[in-house]
Image (tube, helix red, strand yellow):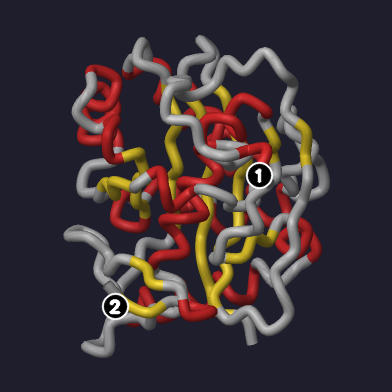
Amino acid sequence: MELGMHGLTRPAPPRGVSPARPAALVLGWGFRAQAQASSFASCWDQAQDLAKNASTDKSANKSKDASTDPAQLSPWAALLQAPASLCLAVLDHKLANPAGLQLQAWAAATLPGAPCLPCDERRLRGLATPHQSPRMMQRFATGSLCEALALHAAGLNAGSQPDARGDVQAAARAEAFAEAFAKPFAERHATPLTPASADPACRHRASVRHDGPGDPHPATVAPASPPPGATGVARLLIPRLVSSDGLATLALAHAFQDS
């Protein structure tokens, strides 16, 4: 364990996620028990399309999600092609279920070498996310599972420095993150690493078991802002994407230091 910002303790990064060389992008995954490899591929293809479109046309937003600014995606299009720059974040208790095994098999084939970070759902409670699903709020006390996972996992390595043994690419990548995301879109979607004050009406209910997408209530966007003086901030690059079969969701986040 180590001491995080505002005195909160946080677990040390698990094996596969070095505190000295954090992953450039974190993929937060939510999914139902019926999810297949095609479900994860559908979300991934959407993320790839967003990045590709942003790289070829910064002036037009071709995605269906108006909150995704292509000008912010373009620097990271190449990173989506580099598994070494990625880390997957999944609820720990879902890794061993059939859908979790499907995700791991898909990732091994599509993103070889990308580590998988198992996350404790208790650490997601009260974490502010752009999308607000009443069902997710009731079950996990956070508005979007995939967004919360991405932000939480990115936050574990906030403040980490590139390896001092000479990883020039990692150093350049860290500098690029801080520069490219200090822009209006990032500010609108900034989320503090520390949990927001949880609404008593949205307490965690272990008896309610809902996983992934499929919420009958439409999600609403409620951007959050970092607290004054925040030093480590996790931010979304791509908000919640939903697979074509409605069985999986994906969000991408990263972390950097505020000055």
Q: Of the residues shown, which amino acid type is indicated by label 2?
A: Ala
The quarter of the rendered structure image containing the N terminus is bottom left
**Is residue 25 shown to the viewer in this render?**
yes
- Establish if 37 lies above or below 139: above
- Establish if 100 lies above or below 240: above
Residue position for label 1: 200
Residue 20's tag is 2
Residue 72's tag is none
229 or 200, nearer to the observer: 200
146 or 198, nearer to the observer: 198
210 or 233, nearer to the observer: 210
Q: Of the residues shown, which amino acid type is indicated by label 1?
A: Pro
Report the residue at 61% width, 34% height from top.
Answer: 137
Relative horizontal placement of residue 112, taking residue 193 as reference (left or right): left
The image position of residue 179, as x and y in percent, is 63, 76
Instruction: Identify the image quadrant of residue 6.
Output: bottom right
* Neighbours of disc 1 within 10 Å: few (<14), some (14-19), many (20+): few
